[in-house]
Amino acid sequence: MTPKTTFFASIPKLRSYVQTRTQNNELTDDVVQETMLRTFRSREVEHLQNPLAYMLTVSKTVLFDHWKSKHKTETDYELDAIVDKSASIEDVYLQQEKIRILGEVLANMPALRKKVFKMRRIDGKSREDIANELQISVEAVKKHINRAMIELTKCADKHDWTF
């Protein structure tokens, strides 16, 4: 079995593992999706002896990052505001460049993929709401989001950006 075949065969087990920790289907989907992206972006993905073990470790990090971001304190928000105000002109320019380039990537996506991505990631709508509104299946919504994320990730990798 090739590493990628093993990788894809491990996804149901990964999803089950994450689901037992989140008890939330939408969060589970987001964590699995982010885990897959981080795994594919890893330089070691081709040399993994046990892709499932690697993905479980990555999923723990993704979950930790999610929970950490949900529990920011008032001081954290104040520090964020101070850091934002002290950003250099160069940092601001680089951020604007990233936004411009990513905007171009979004603009060049197929119309439905772009619409689904914006509805999910910018408007914050649930997959089910998007599916109902656009009269497509939830699976189609997931595929459009995954493909959009892959395009954006490739762009970030090409420019050597880290998020």
Image (cartoon, helix red, strand yellow):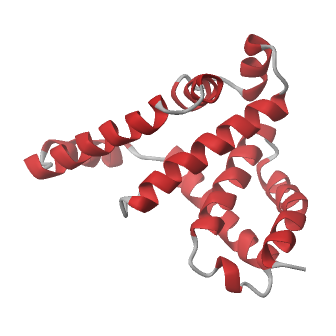
Determine whether, in the image, residue 116 is placed left or right of residue 160.
right
User: Who's the residue at 88% across and 57% down the image?
Assistant: 16
Q: Nearer the viewer, residue 126 or 112?
A: 112
Tell me the quarter of the image containing the N terminus: bottom right
User: Residue 121: horizontal and vertical position, in percent?
Assistant: 56, 32
User: Residue 60: horizontal and vertical position, in percent?
Assistant: 67, 66
Above or below residue 17? Residue 105 is: above
Q: Nearer the viewer, residue 61 or 152?
A: 152
User: Residue 23: horizontal and vertical position, in percent?
Assistant: 82, 45
The quadrant in which residue 64 appears is: bottom right
The quadrant in which residue 36 appears is: bottom right
The quadrant in which residue 56 appears is: bottom right
Determine whether, in the image, residue 160 is placed left or right of residue 34.
left
User: Residue 47: horizontal and vertical position, in percent?
Assistant: 69, 86
Tell me the quarter of the image containing the C terminus: bottom left
Determine whether, in the image, residue 6 is placed left or right of residue 41.
right
User: Who's the residue at 82% across and 29% down the image?
Assistant: 138
Determine whether, in the image, residue 110 is placed left or right of residue 26.
left
Q: Nearer the viewer, residue 18 or 143?
A: 143
